[in-house]
Amino acid sequence: MAKAETSKNKSIPRFNVPWEQLMDDEGFVKMFLSEVLEEYIQKQRWYGGKSSKLKYIELTEYFRIQQNEEVYYGLILEVNFQEAFYQHYFLPIAFVTDEDFAKKDRILSVNVQGTDGVLIDAINLEAFRRLVFERILSSEPNDTTRVQYHRGDALKETAYQSSRFMGMEQSNTSVIINDKCVIKFFRRIYANKNPDYEMSRFLSNRKGFKNTPAYQGSLNIIDSDNFIITIALMQELVPNQGDAWEYMLEKMLKVFSNLSLRGIKVDRLPNHELFLRLPLRKVPHEIIDWAGLSIFQEIEQMAKRTAEMHIALGSEFEETAFEPQHFNMDYEVWLKNRVFYQFQNRLNTVENNLHKLDGKTLELAKQFLDGKNEIRKRFQDYDWTKLKGERIRIHGDYHLGQILVKDGDFIILDFEGEPESTIRDRQVKQPPLKDVAGLFRSFHYAIYATIFNHGSELDSTHEDLVTAGEILYRYLIGVFLQKYTELIQAANLNIGYNQERVFMLKYSMLEKAVYELGYEMNARPLWAVIPLEGIASIMNQE
Ligand SMILES: Nc1ncnc2c1ncn2[C@@H]1O[C@H](COP(=O)(O)OP(=O)(O)O)[C@@H](O)[C@H]1O
Ligand SMILES: O=P(O)(O)O[C@H]1O[C@H](CO)[C@@H](O[C@H]2O[C@H](CO)[C@@H](O)[C@H](O)[C@H]2O)[C@H](O)[C@H]1O
């Protein structure tokens, strides 16, 4: 840490304890939580409580992140809201006495035992990042202390050289070390292992699944109730050409442009039965002439990697957290409770915000409200006794934005699960087709996002674009399902008989679209039209 200086500045709070004991000082903690952090935390990009009213902050835990004499504090803050719920956040802090180190994320100017300095978010300090990296690198195989560092098999012996912020739009904070590794510091903290850590370690370290960044290490703590809490996950940095969402948007634009460029008559295009498996070689030449072969080859590759991920997740018979299970009454009750609760929440959100909507979105929103009993009936129609497949741990928030494109192949990221679910719900075993349904919703999103964003530049009518988009969608998912099912069945993972699979896909897609409707209404209301289109199209299928 930077050199100490004594100051005469009387206006900053003074504490007569060494930095190493500051968090044991009740006066400091009280002032810090109420007068300082309440303001600081609400301005942070990673703070997820912006739409609620903060009541007060409590310090749930603190622990030292330390190497030899160098000490930082990890704080776990409980943010309590007026609306009667709370969230936990991780904030590592450092005391720096050199202004040059305190340019960003300053929390408080403070005098500690006669030395002026600033408390900052420690992630800004290279020394802190280096320390975490070195502690992971030098960790014992079975660390039994309260602050547990773990080194994954994929981390090779290497000296620290550099670090920088990843700088992506994200809900956590990631830093890149030596241009080779990513350490993701989780911000929103749950009193449990973070599924991203749990799944990354399992898939990569234990099952050798190659199409996710290799697990290199982690930092977990054992809290006062003996729960493991994940603080950070370290993975290999995968050089890539961007995510599959951006990639697919570019591709879709070309495919839609081809309609007019190649003089394609949309009403003459062949169509394909929804969810019917289709080998790539059987995709009609009219469709290939229009959309090109490569999009189908890429979809096949994505299906392959998705199947391999599920095969790895479903191949565990020792560790109960991953052992496959059958459907049962408990699962059905759990699922219906969630789905009905979420559906009611979406109805309320749409009802309360109708006045903000117009045009097509308003029309679809009214249709959604009018059709509520029909949708409820679909959700009610789930009978576990008819389901013969297996439930396994799944990705849980699988969409094109979670997949990186790397030299024509795909790398699957971010196993943290659906942001709205509790951490326990994210660990419930679910049918793997639920992930597949999530990805199909993403294909639908990419088609509609292209129509909405570029419809006016394209030389085709809106009607033709929608018709062509729906046709393309059916071929894409037909090709995906052919490859995916073939590989899953060859590996003996039971995803049910044909009718069961179609039922599961339809059910899960409706569930996902309803989830998305809430996400969009809150995060980017202009996009709500996409899940509304999705719900309408699912409900209109006989
Ligand atoms: N191991 C990695 N290698 C390369 N890029 C990565 C890696 N991990 C994350 N990224 C990039 O950072 C983005 C955000 O990562 P993500 O894990 O989804 O963060 P968050 O959980 O904070 O949203 C990803 O979309 C990807 O572009
Ligand atoms: O931030 P996360 O990756 O956890 O996921 C949330 O945000 C996603 C949007 O970034 C949202 O995904 C939805 O929009 C995508 C296009 O931006 C689309 O590809 C997905 O299919 C659609 O669900 C995701 O639902 C939400 O959990």
Image: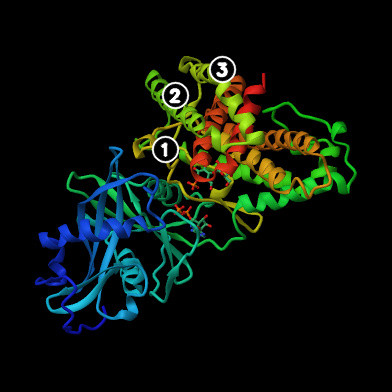
Quadrant of the drawing holding the N terminus: bottom left
Q: Front-most of 222 and 337?
A: 337
The CA distance from mark 3 to mark 1 is 39 Å
- Residue 506 appears at what percent x and percent y? 59, 26
In which quarter of the view is residue 338 placed? top left
Q: How many marks?
A: 3
Q: CA distance from mark 2 to mark 1?
A: 32 Å
Can you give x and y, in whole percent of width and height, for residue 147 in the image?
A: 23, 57
Mark 3 → mark 2, Cα distance in angstroms: 13 Å
Asked if 534 appears above or below 93 in the picture, the reply is: above
Q: Is residue 539 visible?
A: yes
Q: Nearer the viewer, residue 75 or 225?
A: 75
Helix, strand or loop at label 3? It is helix
Q: To which residue does mark 3 refer?
A: 374
Looking at the image, is mark 2 or mark 1 earlier in the sequence?
Answer: 1
Label 2 secondary element: helix
Q: Amino acid at mark 1?
A: Glu
The residue to which callout 2 is attached is 340
The residue most toward the right is: 263
Q: Write the residue at 44% across / 37% down.
A: 393
State the image coordinates of residue 122 (x, y, percent, origin top left). 31, 67
Q: Residues within 10 Å of mark 2 (few under 14, many from 20)?
A: some
Q: Is residue 433 visible?
A: no
Crowding near the residue tagged with mark 3, few <14, some 14–19, many ≥20 C-alpha atoms within 10 Å: few
The type of colouring in the image is: rainbow
In this rendering, the label closer to the viewer, 2 or 1: 2
Q: Is residue 399 left or right of residue 27?
A: right
Determine which residue is flagged by label 1.
Answer: 316
Q: Indicate the secondary structure of the residue bearing disc 1.
A: loop
